[in-house]
Image (spheres, rainbow, N blue to C red):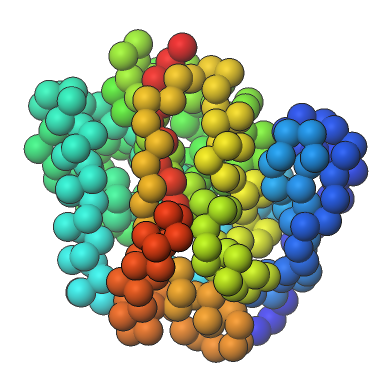
Amino acid sequence: MEALRVRTKSLTQCPLCSSAKINLFIKSYDFETNSGEYCIYKCFHCGIHFTNPIPIEEDLPKLYSVKTKDSPHNNVLVSNLRSFHFQHFLSKILSKFGGSCDVLDFGSGDGFFANECRKNKYCNSITATDFQECCPHFLKKHVDEIKVLYFNYANFYNVSRKYDVIFLRNVFEHIIDPKKFLRRLRSKLKEKGEIVVEVPNFDSIWRIIFGRFYFALFLPRHIFHFSPETIELVTSDLFNIIKISKTHSPGIGGSLGYMTHTSISNTGLIGLLSFPFQILVDKIFKSSSSMVLTLEKK
């Protein structure tokens, strides 16, 4: 694979609390696009783990313009499983707001989740936003500027809409300044609204098992690596945490792919067949590969 050239900057203090008491925790690599070696450091003041060096902000779009192993593909089984899971997940959250819920999917990626929002009976409108100028694949034919809208990041903050629910699914760990980001999103939330944040769990037993090859490290795209304690530290200034739930995302396949330098993915045959075993081990160790937080304004 040709190496992706990404400009980076090295950090000499914690990007969250500015403490200089930081130590190397683990060395790993960008197994997706071959942009080089990266480290994860731990701050001994606030406890957060973070990537070092980090990509400079101007080069971040490069990292998302290249399709990774688990980019969407035409797998009917995977699409149906995703759809079933998302509809169940959405109905539990959106039903609290009746049948007129205005939803924001921040970091919409391929648009699959936003499209599932569109189809959900409790959704009144869905706004999706991401890096790309063009509307993502799964939403393209549904955008009507009334119920379904798409904005790139550059234009999104000029939009005056407010939302009942804001979803940050596998987004928050990518943000260079998470507290500033939350302050900006808070202004987009209706008074009784909620933000639903899903992030990988750095305390997962599978991170310990796979070490530097653990798929959810996803370097250098993941800037922060959250545990239940550190995600609370980041969000508690502006929000009350209504609930923290353990959840599971396939990760064995991608981790084996990194370890063996092959194309094994999380959504391929090995990844899907190993997923029940992954969940079983998580339950035995009272762990999870991901966490979902529900936040409300203070």
Q: Is residue 228 left or right of residue 138?
A: right
For the question of whether residue 72 can be seen, the reply is no
Task: Please name whichever residue, 241 or 189, is drawn nearer the observer in this view of the structure.
Answer: 241
In the image, what residue occupies the spot 39% across and 63% down? Answer: 284
Report if residue 29 is visible in the image. Answer: yes
**Residue 237 in the image: above or below residue 115:** above
The residue depicted at 55 percent of the width and 88 percent of the height is: 262
Residue at left 18%, top 23%? Answer: 97
Q: Residue at x 43, y 46 (%)?
A: 291
Residue 157 in the image: x percent, y percent? 50, 26
* Residue 23 on image: x %, y %: 85, 50
Judged left or right of residue 280, residue 231 is right
Is residue 239 shown left or right of residue 18? left
User: In which quarter of the view is residue 211 placed?
Assistant: bottom right
The image quadrant of residue 258 is bottom right
Q: Say above or below: 84 vs 149.
A: below
Q: Quadrant of residue 251?
A: bottom left
